[in-house]
Amino acid sequence: MGEVLAGYRATAAARMTELVRAESLVKHFPSGGWLLGRRPPVRALNGVTLSVLRGETLALVGESGSGKTTLARCLLRLTAPTAGRVVFDGIDLFSLPEPEIRKLRRRMQLVFQDPAAALNPRMTAGAAIREPLEAHGISRGSEAKARVSALLAEVGLPPGLAERFPHELSGGQRQRVVIARALSLEPEFLVLDEPVSNLDVSVAAQILNLLADLQEKRGLTYLLIAHDLSVVRHMASRVAVLYAGRIVEIGPCDELYERPLHPYTEALLSAVPSPDPLQSKRRVILGGEPPSPRRIPAGCPFYGRCHHTRRDDRCAGELPVLREVGSAHWSACHYAETLGARR
């Protein structure tokens, strides 16, 4: 995948205007019923603040349950936060009435993790792409049909594929159809939720190259949710690391990979396989489990699993704030400088 996003970082660096901003986002989900009694809510997000810059790819990484998908859904106004706000191109999303947000939704779209589940099995590929065009009054009839053919060609599919149903398509073809449907409304912002996790390596590389080409051609902004840190390194210009509903580190991709400033990030990166079988690599094995989302500790949420040599009572009792440690490189660790210095 070395050819993915060739030359992209220079392009992204030139576009530094903010497109999306989350401010102190909190999301709690109620839990339990009358059989279980009153239980604490599930605290999926615990004060997340971050910006997505126009034209960049910001990757969200972290374990399952860390809050990645909940954050993405809040950014798209698919889930209402308990507190905080989301600003899209200067507009407060959650202050808009429904008719206005419907117009704004054309500018932000979601590419789902499982294309088979994202497509209606009773609709052809062409009908799936045509549906948003007609729903938003963009085009109908022969004009919509021509637009569908153009979108299929743009994602590398023949026009005749429009008459096929999802079960007649391969996994890669289905994902291309999902991408074409997302592009049909001419969005500026795409959330890519594990877009290649269900594909084999060769097909995944083709989809990543397609996404890179589309970003360059259309000037798209991506929020990439991913578990595969090798994919993240090729795709992302910046990386945000989530743990227990908080951002524990965020910074430029190359800088973060070379010099992680949070013990959790260090552990994640140590698990990335090296392409050189002769290269020795220190593996960080995390013990224990992440804290329960119903009982987030008062101090550092990573305290119980932390391997930092400076780990102490301050970590257990005082929540570390996200602070800038290097140039545009932020960490929520009391002793981030010590971790960076020893590498």
Image: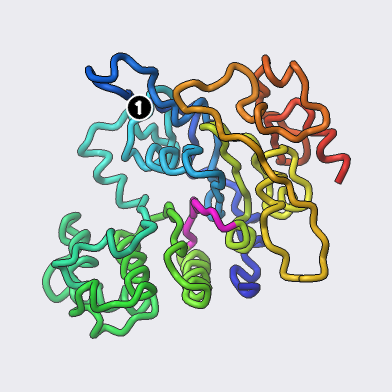
Nearer the observer, 325 or 19: 325
Q: Residue at x 69, y 51 (%)?
A: 269
Secondary structure of the residue carrying tag 1 is: strand
Q: Residues within 10 Å of mark 1 (few under 14, many from 20)?
A: some
Q: Residue at x 33, y 60 (%)?
A: 182
Nearer the observer, 186 or 167: 167
Q: What span is colored magenta in the figure?
A: 219-228
Q: Please, which residue is most extreme toward the left here? A: 141
Q: Which amino acid type is shown beneath numbered disc 1?
A: Phe
User: Is residue 96 highlighted in magenta?
Assistant: no
Question: Is 174 drawn above or below residue 271 in the view shown?
Answer: below
Nearer the observer, 288 or 274: 288
Q: Can you give x and y, in whole percent of width and height, for residue 303 in the image?
A: 67, 27
Q: Can you give x and y, in whole percent of width and height, for residue 339 in the image?
A: 81, 37
Give the quadrant of the N terminus: bottom right
**Residue 18, visible in the rendered structure:** yes
